[in-house]
Image (tube, grey):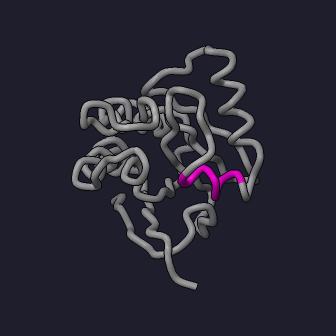
Amino acid sequence: MASITYLTGDATAPKLRPAVIAHVCNDIGGWGAGFVLAISKRWKAPEADYRAWYKSGKDFALGRTRLVMVDDDLWVANMIAQHGIRRRAGVPPIRYDALREALSELHAQAPREASVHMPRIGCGLAGGTWDEVGPIVEETLVAQGRDVVVYDFGGA
């Protein structure tokens, strides 16, 4: 039975393989704040792919996901689930429906045996809450039989 496990640590360094590291991207081509900095520090390919995807415009839209292989049995999922980068009229950038679609795409694209590793996606700069995001993760991944590990950064 699949489950969500909560750990304190670095979401860019999953111990279990095969694995997918999931994170939320915006729909305006911006990459430079939040969890993407940790991704770019470790690998160049996810940012390069995101920027090329944005520039091409092909299938670059809210709710879409692209997996980028960064190592043997390790991928980064660039998921477009944030509209812009700032609150507008009190509405945070996260788009929960787009996140649901993006996580469903991640599940469909990822190797069946791969677990999914993530920070509390959509809850930092995107302005979402885990009370909203957690059930979406449960519905789109865990209920479909995929194990998920959620990381809270901390420790030495």
- Which residue: 61% across, 14% down? 58
**Vertically, is 68 above or below 42?**
above
- Which residue: 59% across, 55% down? 19
Q: Is residue 114 visible?
A: no
**Vertically, is 29 above or below 124?**
above
- Which residue: 43% across, 62% down? 150
**Looking at this view, is 49 or 34 the one in front?**
34
**Vertically, is 7 above or below 120?**
below
Tell whether 97 sits left or right of 12: left
* Residue 152 x %, y %: 44, 69
Which residues fall within the magenta stretch?
34-40
Tell whether 24 sits left or right of 33: left
**Looking at this view, is 142 or 136 the one in front?**
136
**Looking at this view, is 18 or 156 the one in front?**
156
* Residue 91 x %, y %: 27, 35
Main secondary-structure element of the magenta-colored stretch = helix
- Which residue: 69% across, 30% down? 51
Query: What is the quadrant of residue 1 in the picture?
Result: bottom left
* Residue 138 x %, y %: 29, 50
Tell whether 50 sits left or right of 113: right
Quarter of the image that includes the C terminus: bottom right
Query: What is the quadrant of residue 5 in the picture?
Result: bottom left
